[in-house]
Amino acid sequence: MAPRPPEIPGLFTDYENGRPIAMTPIEMWNETFIRKNLITRECLVTKVHWYKGRKSTQREFLRFDISSPDKVHTAILIAERGAGDSSKGKDRLPGTTEPTDATTPPANPTDSMIGPGIPSVTITPPFASPDVASDSTASSADETSPNIARGKSTATDRKKKLKAEGSSENASSSSSFISRGLANDEIVHATLDSIAGVPMERKCKDSDFISALTFPEDAGPSANKIATLLVVTSALEPMYRLMNMQCYWFVATVFEALKCLFPGAKQDITGHNGGTWYQVRIPKKASVDAACRDYDKAQTALDAEIEEESRRSEATGN
């Protein structure tokens, strides 16, 4: 008889427990279960799957298969981005519940999203948001040159001004349409083949497979590192924007960053057009570079903090 799965909160669930698993905000999941739990560094990712839902929303998500330290059991982790409050209760796994404390702010305003004591990373937006574009256009419409001030504007100047004002209004209304507030970047986890994992596997079977990364044995990233990457990617653009910062952007950024940070994985891909919005591909190159940069800073800081705590513990005999 095979041994029971390990009890590792945040990754492995009670094998026989049929209670629904709640979707958890990524930063809360990391801080509560993963960040300083040394056992999560022994749980390695074996495969990452990229899926796209078949429903009208066609939400894309990532599934991580993570091995137990003894390599006997597997946990599955699904990470995805939702549209803030407007998506509350939609497209959730059957039987899941809302987290009860999803908006708890950090205890210390100076703490980064990775956790207390780790310096905040510099966030560089991967490309200009609609709001930024709107502001830029408005500035160009505010013509204050000496000629205009003296009432000597030419017909060309007037046309440019009218065009700029129209563009500003269109950009403003477009921005209000595609901006959906803070994004819901969440995860759900369970032991593979457990009762709790059934709805998660069903979600994958009911979606289209886009691509996958299979890591060589004992060469995949740890659950601890995956958590760091998910958190820094979420922090890159915390606002949900329908046309450029939605689930497609989140999944594509994490997936491509994994290939850069942990080379050597074999990629399987289909002809399905993932990472698009109505056949228009979502740009992600700049965000991938930023995610990798911020991951390196955050993970290095976390490793140093854990090492320092370990030295202090040995020194005091605790």
Image (cartoon, rainbow, N blue to C red):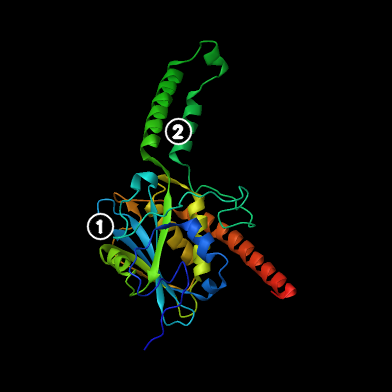
Q: Quadrant of the C terminus?
A: bottom right
| Residue farthest to the bottom, as pictured | 1
Figure quadrant of residue 196 = bottom left
Q: Residues within 10 Å of mark 1 (few under 14, many from 20)?
A: few
Residue 8 is tagged as none
Q: Nearer the viewer, residue 7 or 227?
A: 7
Secondary structure under tag 2 reads helix
Find residue 207 and report its horizontal and vertical position in percent.
27, 62
Residue drawn at (35%, 48%) of the image: 88
Check disc 2 and report the residue beneath it: 134
Question: Tags 1 and 2 in contact by the CB under 8 Å rule?
Answer: no
Find residue 253 and report its horizontal and vertical position in percent.
45, 57
Residue drawn at (32%, 51%) of the image: 89
Find residue 70 and report its horizontal and vertical position in percent.
47, 82
Question: How many numbered circles does the render carry?
Answer: 2
Q: Amino acid at mark 1?
A: Arg
Residue drawn at (43%, 23%) of the image: 160
Check disc 1 and report the residue beneath it: 54
Secondary structure under tag 1 reads loop
In the image, 163: left or right of 202?
right
Q: Quadrant of the N terminus?
A: bottom left
Find residue 114 and report its horizontal and vertical position in percent.
56, 57
Q: Amino acid at mark 2?
A: Ser
Q: Earlier in the sequence, mark 1 or mark 2?
A: 1
Does 254 sit above or below residue 194? above
Residue drawn at (25%, 51%) of the image: 56
